[in-house]
Image (cartoon, grey):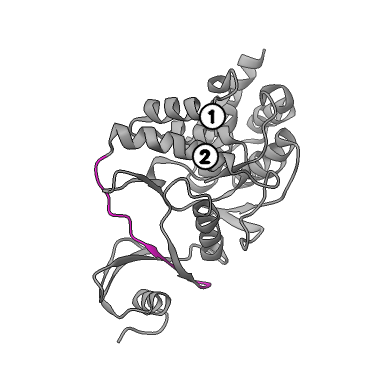
Amino acid sequence: MYPAGSSSTAAARFTGRAVTGERPLSGSLTEVTLDDGRTVMVKAADGAGATRAEAAGLRWLAGTGTVRIPAVHGVDERLLVTDRVVQGPARARAAARFGRDLAALHAAGAPAFGTAPPGGPEEAYIGLAPMRNVTGDDWPRWYAEHRVLPYLRRAVDAGTVRAAEAADVERVCERLPELAGPAEPPARLHGDLWNGNVLWGADGHVHLIDPAAHGGHRETDLAMLRLFGCPHLDRILASYDEAAPLADGWTERVGVHQLFPLLVHAVLFGRGYAEQALSTARAALRHAG
């Protein structure tokens, strides 16, 4: 018997199967083997409401029938139980399929920018950082008020960004209406689409985990992929653009969309990311003239 509240107890409760073993993978992840031979993942909460926010995001993304998403078996205030993704090599054919599937995911849309997944809390998370899902209809204003500036203020309060430096990011926010490119409808975003959340499955498909899902601008997901790199990235982007052509000049707007994740990382991990965010902001201003 496993103690109440343990990963194995949660896996048994949510799958209805007996547990034959468990293997801790990290501080928050445990791999649990069931008596029918399947393996599930149990993730411990990073903060209040984090598991429910993640579960809601996984279900919202999976409901599109596009990108492969691990099935959610159950969730409570502390633990989330999902299918385990059996990983394989990163292949070009899977990358091309992922580009098309990601375009279809984004096209599934959202009611507004900042929309939370059904059943997901307004007070959500991106990684370990709190993220508020407050809605808006105008992307430049919404992105500035609810994605860039909250993390800039946190970084300034922590001393990670100096007040004088913050002015460069604030100027980008002021000029977002001219920097944002053509208006786009709200897309259904993964929201934390860095390489670590892109799993190359042994089944020949890409699977996405750990979303910070919300309604947003589709270029933000693509900018996140470019920020931290991804195998076969050129193939992914070409396939995406073929399926759902991107607006002219989108590569010149990548830095604007990267400000959000860079400032999140500055809040979580310190000055190095703050310097990268400031350099990105200054480059955007120079390009705008």
Nearer the observer, 10 or 281 = 10
Q: Quadrant of residue 232?
A: top left
Q: Dot 2 lies on which element?
A: helix
**Residue named by callout 1:** 244
Does any portion of residue 230 appear in the rendered image? no
User: As drawn, is 174 to the left or to the right of 280?
Assistant: right
Crowding near the residue tagged with mark 2, few <14, some 14–19, many ≥20 C-alpha atoms within 10 Å? many
Q: Quadrant of the N terminus?
A: bottom left
Q: Earlier in the sequence, mark 1 or mark 2?
A: 2
Q: Please tell me which residue is depicted at 72% across the width and 41% down the height of the picture.
A: 145
Residue 234 % position (x, y): 39, 25
Question: CB of mark 1 within 8 Å of CB of mark 2?
Answer: yes
What residue span does the magenta drawing correspond to? 76-89
Residue 35 % position (x, y): 25, 76
- Furthest-top residue in view? 289
- Furthest-bottom residue in view? 1
**Residue named by callout 2:** 104
Q: Quadrant of residue 231?
A: top left
Q: Please tell me which residue is depicted at 42% across the width and 61% down the height of the picture.
A: 71
Q: Quadrant of the C terminus?
A: top right
Dominant secondary-structure state across the stretch colored magenta: loop
User: As drawn, is 242 to the left or to the right of 256?
Assistant: left
Real-space CA distance between mark 1 and mark 2, rounded to the nearest whole angstrom = 8 Å
Nearer the observer, 71 or 143 = 71
Going by the numbered disc 1, the residue's amino acid type is Ala
Residue 282 % position (x, y): 60, 22
User: As drawn, is 283 to the left or to the right of 65?
Assistant: right
Q: Please tell me which residue is depicted at 39% across the width and 36% down the height of the picture.
A: 97
In magenta stretch: residue 84:
yes
Nearer the observer, 47 or 221 = 221
Residue 66 to residue 241: above or below = below
